[in-house]
Amino acid sequence: MRRLNLKSAQTAHFGMIRDINRQIVLNYVRDRGPISRAEMARETLLQRSTVSAIVDALVGEGVVEEIGKGESTGGRCPTLLRLRVGRPAVIGVDISPTYTTVASSDIAGTILEKRQFLTNPDFEKTLSQAVEYVVELGAKGSGNIEGVGVVLPGLVDPLSGKALYIPYFDWRDLDVEQRIASATGFRVMIDNDANAAALAELWFGSPEVSETRDFILVFVSEGLGTGIILDRQIYRGAAGGAGEFGHMIIGQEAPVACSCGSYDCWEAFASGRATVARYARLIAQRDDATQLTFAELIERALQGEAEARTALLETAQNLSIGISNLIVGFSPELIIIGGPIARAWPLFADVLSQIVQRSVRRGLPSARIIASTLGERTTLMGALSLVLSVKFTCDVVSTHVTSFA
């Protein structure tokens, strides 16, 4: 049970109840469509007239569409409904240390168009190019763009809309949300890559993930971060700082410095940069060792190169230490491994799972550990999810009825 905060609690009023009913109907269409008005009325116990009024409004807004007749169960054939797909509704901007991707999707999260360019270490140049593509793709939405979701690889405050620190480029205190909103006229939401990836799994992952109440996504790319889902929502903590477990101390003298400069953080032992550094030591006689990217190392490991696999397995061993701590501390149902490393899951899954099982003390609950179900699209889908999750969640329940301590 969650405790009611009486200082900010409000009683329900007709408008709020109407909004809740609207969100219920909209989510039934999203999750169960094609579905009829009558079927929704039966399953939700709402009056048929209430469902019909809500559906008519959603159809008028272009969010829901009628797609034909279903089978009769004794009377007239019901009219089936689904989300209106194929029309731009959301734009996602995924800024990674290597590439920046800008994409449009329909309201169901299907990507329609995509633009990509090398991320420039100069923030102004990266922002300018991203804004150009947002404007281009947004113009095709005919005024129906719900918003723009932006994902960055570092410390982000979603409430203020600022990128506090992006270590790969030493970007600090950047008002990303305001800058993009002013340049495009769209509503903008931002978050870090790990949180966004976790949100994407919650909204678009396989049923094994999307139906899980509590899980943690460990996002391993050049750096390392975690996205925490508790009670089916992101736990961000104060100023969006939750999930920075990459700075958890797990040892000494790591192969690379963490983004904070320390050599004892989990990120310094289990990130993509740490893996590349291990590999470089193993093949020090070769000129290409220091130029290799994490994605290229993973490809070599998948092709069977022994040194690449050795470096990857050592990273997995260090990854398991931090995961064991997360399991003991949070007792989640599920741990998801996301980011580029997920491609190599078959190569290290057994080693990681075995070490975790040994590390979690007997008698304490463990957790299932799986690879991301969204593959390389995780952070881009996360950017889209920042907007779509607001569209489909019943925020009116928490903001108008109760606030919890």
Image: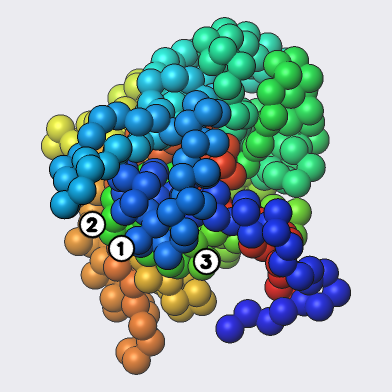
Whether residue 242 is visible = no
Q: Residue furthest bottom?
A: 363
Assess whether mark 3 and mark 2 are in contact (beta carbons under 8 angstroms): no
Q: CA distance from mark 1 to mark 3?
A: 17 Å
Q: Secondary structure at mark 3?
A: strand
Identity of the residue drawn at 52% across and 10% down:
140
Closer to the N terminus: mark 2 or mark 3? 3
Residue where numbered disc 2 is placed: 349
Q: Specify the amino acid type for callout 2.
A: Ala
Task: Establish if 279 lies above or below 242.
Answer: above
Whether residue 59 is visible = yes
Q: Quadrant of the C terminus?
A: bottom right
- Position in image of residue 119 (x %, y %): 56, 19
Q: Specify the amino acid type for callout 1.
A: Ile
Q: Quadrant of the N terminus?
A: bottom right
Most foreground residue, 385 or 288: 385
Q: Residue furthest front?
A: 75
Identity of the residue drawn at 34% across and 57% down:
209
Residue where numbered disc 1 is placed: 369
- Position in image of residue 260 (x %, y %): 66, 47
- Position in image of residue 123 (x %, y %): 70, 20
Closer to the N terminus: mark 1 or mark 3? 3
Assess whether mark 3 and mark 1 are in contact (beta carbons under 8 angstroms): no
Could you tell whether 108 is left or right of 330 in the image?
Answer: left
Q: CA distance from mark 2 to mark 1?
A: 8 Å
Q: Secondary structure at mark 1?
A: strand
Could you tell whether 315 is left or right of 61 in the image?
Answer: left
Residue where numbered disc 3 is placed: 230
Most foreground residue, 363 or 191: 191
